[in-house]
Amino acid sequence: MRYLLIVFVFWTSGGVLAQKIAALEESQQMQQELNAAYTNPETSVLMEDDFKNFEGLEFYPLSEEFIVEAKFVRTPDEKPFEMPTTTERLPKYVKFGELQFTLKGQALKLDVYQATDHEKHEGYEDYLFLPFTDMTNGDGSYGGGRYMDFRIPKGNKVILDFNQAYNPYCAYNPKYSCPIPPEGNDLPLRIEAGVKAFDSL
């Protein structure tokens, strides 16, 4: 029985390790694609003057430390609400679920949201919005917080990879209207992963 337990622990740990390796590869590709989009004037949200000195986005080094397994808890009885933005626009969202995980020895939680009009946008039918803030905001990363893309999982276990955290458009161009991360998604630690703050100088 003890041997079977050891084998089971090794198998489950190996499964998580394999998922983390796959996540790192996916994050590297995501960052390359994001950088390509921002350096291309035809697809970039940067202001015209910023291209004079722009050589590419800055990222924290890819790190396995910021890839965690999280428990996904659905919250089906939530009511829609208007999420504040950097402008007067008030898009409607509903809390879809919670991600519960441990990072750097701390038990943490992030809420994930779904736009109430998600079905109107092709390709976003199962899209969830994950905005968050952390202790790097204004000290390494964009002061207004960052976002992550998330898809509705089939089960209740997911891999949460902060290497894929990116800035809202308004971090580069004030003409955009960007949702402000709710207070409940403020993480009390430094998430040194993903896109860094943008310097337009």
Image (cartoon, rainbow, N blue to C red):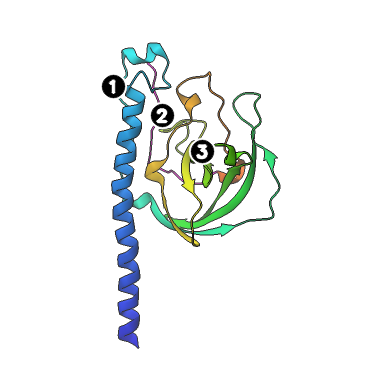
Residue that numbered label 3 is attached to: 122
> In this orientation, which residue lies closer to the viewer: 50 or 129?
129
Residue 47 x, y percent position in the rendering = 42, 15
Residue 192 within the segment the image draws in magenta: yes
Residue 73 x, y percent position in the rendering = 56, 59
Q: Secondary structure at mark 1?
A: loop
Residue that numbered label 1 is attached to: 55
- The mark total stands at 3
User: Looking at the picture, which amino acid does disc 3 mark?
Assistant: Glu
Q: Earlier in the sequence, mark 2 or mark 3?
A: 3
Pair 2/1: label in front:
1
Mark 2, other Cα within 10 Å: few <14 / some 14–19 / many ≥20: many
Regarding residue 192, the answer to whether it shows in the image is: no
Regarding residue 131, the answer to whether it shows in the image is: yes
Q: Is residue 84 left or right of residue 107?
A: right
Residue 151 x, y percent position in the rendering = 48, 49
Q: Is residue 18 left or right of residue 196?
A: left
Callout 2–callout 3 Cβ contact below 8 Å: no
Callout 3–callout 1 Cβ contact below 8 Å: no
Q: Alpha-carbon distance for marks 3 and 1?
A: 32 Å
Query: Of the numbered discs in the image, which one, if any, rests on residue 135?
Result: none
Residue at the image point whose x is 33% and y is 67% from the top = 13
Q: Secondary structure at mark 2?
A: loop
Residue that numbered label 2 is attached to: 197
Q: Earlier in the sequence, mark 3 or mark 1?
A: 1
Q: Which residue, as the protein is rendered here, is positioned at the far bottom?
A: 1
User: Looking at the picture, which amino acid does disc 2 mark?
Assistant: Ala
Which stretch is magenta? 186-201
